[in-house]
Image (cartoon, rainbow, N blue to C red):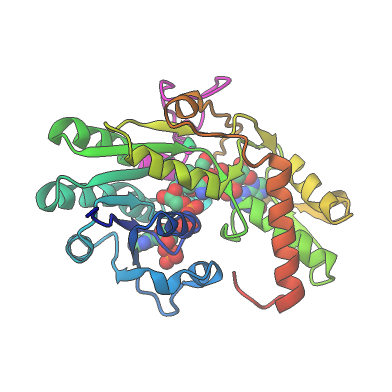
Amino acid sequence: MRKIKSALITGITGQDGTYLSKFLLEKGYKVFGTYRRISSPNFWRLEHLGIKDKIKLIPCDLLDEGSLATALKISDPDEIYNLAAQSFVDASFSEPIATAQITGLSVLRLLEVIRLLKPKIRFYQASTSEMFGGVKKGSLNENTPFYPKSPYGVAKLFAHWITLNYRESYNLFACSGILFNHESPLRGQEFVTRKITSAAAKIKLGLAKELRLGNLDAKRDWGYAPDYCECMYLMLQKKSPEDFVIASGENHTVREFVQKAFACLGLDYRDYVKIDKSFFRPSDVPSLLGDSKKAQKELNWNPRKTSFDQLIKIMVEADLERYQQKGPGIIF
Ligand code: NAP
Ligand code: GDD
């Protein structure tokens, strides 16, 4: 009889953790997820997709090796997806040391626990296009040298290299997905796309009057989160571990995103958007554009499943429905 596969997802309460859980549950996996103890548990995304009760939740903090080891012992997984991180670039400027600890060094803690306790596990690390940061080159792929521009990018680069180092030094099945920005209705409210779609919905319903933003000229290569989570799984099904860039292959300015999001609701963004210096970063990444040809060829992955316009429509409609049903006070 075929053994049921099991997966451990760190950061299961986040955007990607939730979509990946749903995907793996549908594949028949037994899914375990780690969450950190906080005064009000943050399970709204898992509840929103109706999967919270199908997952075994394990309290675990990335800063505590003992709790990481316990999570491994309880779950005894075939695969680990390491998605937990302090993932907000802006916050990494105000909390650089915490970001280095959580987003960078914790990956080494986890790899050490795997090496010592369960070296046969397949390990996925959530790397990021933010590691390319200031690279001035058209399209970025697996061979492009890195140049991070934020404490977050630097911490992720450490995590990326230590994953590669453990693969080479100890023969672990450890690999990284270098994912470009991916968004959804489950995106955190502080990220620019969700900040825009939720403000547009509130303005449309008369619940807000304006939207304050920073750098509208920044360009990002935006995709749809569920499409990207599938790649994490595909990478761990390969015969040998390799790193992959996952990107849509087109980029747009923040201005274009905001213009289209407001237009979905029949609004002109120029009537509502105010530029606010407090949302500018000490150093911003001006432009990111990814080349995912390797993933298209080797993982048979389609970067055009959900277009830029479709992504905006999905997010705007979801926020409009939320605020119509629940009003402005609800947190999601
Ligand atoms: P997210 O929504 O911010 O989720 C991050 C997760 O990490 C949350 O579950 C959070 O828990 C958890 N976490 C934070 N600090 C922790 C700690 N000290 N101990 C334990 N858990 C902790 O991020 P996402 O968008 O799903 O992204 C998933 C991963 O991919 C992250 O590593 C991110 O850096 C990376 N990435 C994301 C993108 C993107 O565009 N989304 C692109 C490239 C790479 P709480 O719910 O308690 O806060
Ligand atoms: N958050 C935010 N808020 N960003 C703004 C705002 C604002 O009010 N106004 C302009 N921006 C600009 C930022 O300066 C940045 O250039 C761009 O919008 C995107 O910002 P975020 O949505 O915060 O995403 P990010 O690109 O910094 O980081 C995300 O993508 C990375 C992959 O490239 C995060 O998900 C990271 O975790 C991820 O690694």
Q: Quadrant of residue 325?
A: bottom right
Using the image, determine if residue 14 lies above or below residue 308: below
Ligand 1 in which quarter: bottom left
Residue 327 visible from this viewpoint: no
Q: Is residue 82 visible?
A: yes
Horizontally, residue 14 falls left or right of residue 164, namely: right
**Image mark count:** 0
Taking depth in this image into account, of 327 and 311 the one nearest to the observer is 311
> Residue 13 versus residue 103: which sits nearer the camera?
13
Please tell me whether residue 217 is drawn above or below residue 312 in the rendered image. above
The single residue placed furthest to the front in the displayed view is 1
Q: Left or right of 182: which side holds 242? A: left
Q: Quadrant of the C terminus?
A: bottom right
Q: Bounds of the magenta span?
A: 130-156
Q: Nearer the viewer, residue 139 or 213?
A: 139
In the image, farthest residue toward the left: 116
Image coords of residue 125 (percent x, y): 34, 44
Q: Quadrant of the N terminus?
A: bottom left
Which quadrant holds residue 53?
A: bottom left
**Magenta stretch prevailing secondary structure:** loop
Instruction: Say which of 249 and 28 sits in front.
Output: 28
> Is residue 159 one of those drawn in magenta?
no
For residue 135: magenta?
yes
Place of residue 39 in the rendered image (x, y in percent of width and height, measured from the top left): 41, 80
Give the residue at x 59% y 53%. Answer: 191
**Residue drawn 70% across and 62% down?**
318
Residue at 14%, 51% in the rendered image: 118
| In this rendering, position of residue 166 left or right of residue 266 | left
Q: Position of residue 210 (x, y in %)?
A: 80, 61
Picture quadrant of residue 153:
top left
